[in-house]
Image: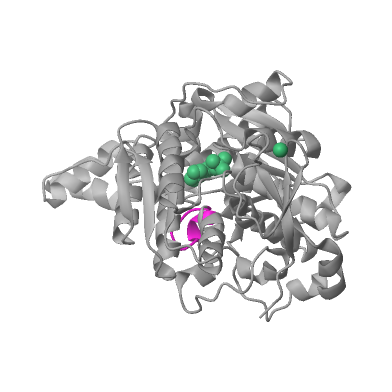
Amino acid sequence: MERTNFCGYRCSLCGEQYAASQQLYLCPKDQGCLDVVLDTAAIRKTVEPLRLSGPDREPSHWRYLPLLPLDDPGARGTPLRRVGWTPLYELPALRAARGLSAFWLKDESSNPTASFKDRASSLVTARAVQIGAGRVVTASTGNAGAALAGMAAALQLPAVVFAPKEAPAAKIGQMLAFGATVILVEGNYDQASALSIEASRELGWYCRNTGYNPFTAEGKKTAAFEIWEAVRQGRIELAGGAPLAIFVSVGDGNIISGLHKGFRDLSDLGWLEFQPRLYGVQAEGSAAIARAFDAGRQSVQPVRASTIADSICVDMPADGARALRAVRETGGSYITVGDRQILQAVAELGRFGVFVEPAAAASYAGFLAALECGRIAAREPVVVLATGSGLKDITAVQKAVPPAPVIEPSLQAVKRLLRRLEPRACGHRIGAEQASE
Ligand SMILES: Cc1ncc(COP(=O)(O)O)c(C=O)c1O
Ligand SMILES: [Zn+2]
């Protein structure tokens, strides 16, 4: 078993430090999100960065256990052990079509419950077992709840999920299939979130809520470690010295602040050889953080959120201050995209073999927008994070593409249809058979 290097928490607003022995969510003084503090001196002494990349390492985010505030999570032989270590695609055909030379897409749909949220939920559930929590709870637009339910099932831990009543059916179905107690709230995500915190306080449940629980960002930071490792191994090439740009869809702002934490940990250890820029992408109808960024504010004001990308539909982001800082401190930017651009991005990625839900396509839509307005050049190295599978929200995905035609069950009907759909591509055979029709 590897020794945990967890030494406490630091408030992201006031800087106050708290001991690891305390069971904390937000800073008791000012409700700021808490950063986990690691014993970097001890890690530096005991861990060789090259050792983390050895071929003997687990092909999951648990390969970074020495950089996580946790002992061995156990759960061998379960889906919890294969979270992370997601594929990095070059997509040569997409590169050629868009004139890109250094583009990569990190596909998080290969996680056990098909979204990025497994990274956070696996850490939080493992932590729950270690502190002896009897039950875990979360509020969710859908993915975090499905991830919590799946990871809790792997550990045989009871889970409760509060989700908006309008959450996509596939996400609710996943939570139920994993055996969670699913409570659908007549209201939006922010209301489900407030209620889940109230219930967890009253009933003593361990709460996973995004940003609220400091371990969520710790799980999400593992994607930064994977990108760092890919750069070290030359799977991502930083030729020409241009800094790597990473595009991330942003709702609560916890994925982007988790990535920032991962890169900061590496920098504190003296292991980070490049300076990545983080680009946050929000839906125009749910852009509280992007607005604060544009206005130069340190804090975020709530909006009345509405977008087809349900996973990033948030009135008041739980991790807004850190999400602002992640972009400012790395020299990135915030970008907003409309629902039309998001749906076009779903369709475009689909044509290159990547199937994503709208919230996961927002990052790619934001990248295209940044290219178009010249904020990013086509030759600059870019990683776009695709955070969730298209199977998560089929109803929304179907809005991105024309409907499939329905025909009567005859070959003539097939030929008629093909002539209508693709008159040129139909070729000789169909043309020749026309006479006999
Ligand atoms: C698919 C997907 N992408 C992006 C996000 C945004 O993450 P965050 O809320 O941490 O900003 C979420 C959050 O639920 C998500 O499910
Ligand atoms: Zn504080």
Residue in view at x 41 percent, y 32 percent: 191
Q: In the drawing, does residue 72 fall left or right of residue 239?
A: left
In the orientation shown, which residue stands out farthest toward the top?
A: 295
Q: Main secondary structure of the magenta part?
A: loop
Residue in the foreground of this view, choosing between 387 and 158: 158
The percent coordinates of residue 346 (x first, y second) are 46, 40
Q: Is residue 112 magenta?
A: yes
Residue in view at x 47 percent, y 32 percent: 313
Q: In the drawing, does residue 167 fall left or right of residue 281?
A: left
Q: How is the image coloured?
A: one colour
Relative height, residue 168 to residue 135 (above, below): above
Report the quarter where the N terminus lies: bottom right
Residue in the foreground of this view, choosing between 158 and 89: 158
Task: Name which quarter of the figure residue 405 lies in.
Answer: top left
Residue in view at x 68 percent, y 49 percent: 259
The percent coordinates of residue 195 (x first, y second) are 40, 38
Task: Name which quarter of the figure residue 231 lies in.
Answer: bottom right
Q: In the drawing, does residue 424 fall left or right of residue 387?
A: left
Q: Magenta span covers which residues?
A: 108-116
The percent coordinates of residue 73 (x first, y second) are 57, 72
Residue in the foreground of this view, choosing between 117 and 36: 36
- Across the whole image, how many numbered discs are drawn on residues? 0
Residue 235 seen in the figure: no
Q: Is residue 428 magenta?
A: no
The percent coordinates of residue 428 (x first, y second) are 30, 50
Task: Name which quarter of the figure residue 100 lies in.
Answer: top right
Residue 75 seen in the figure: yes
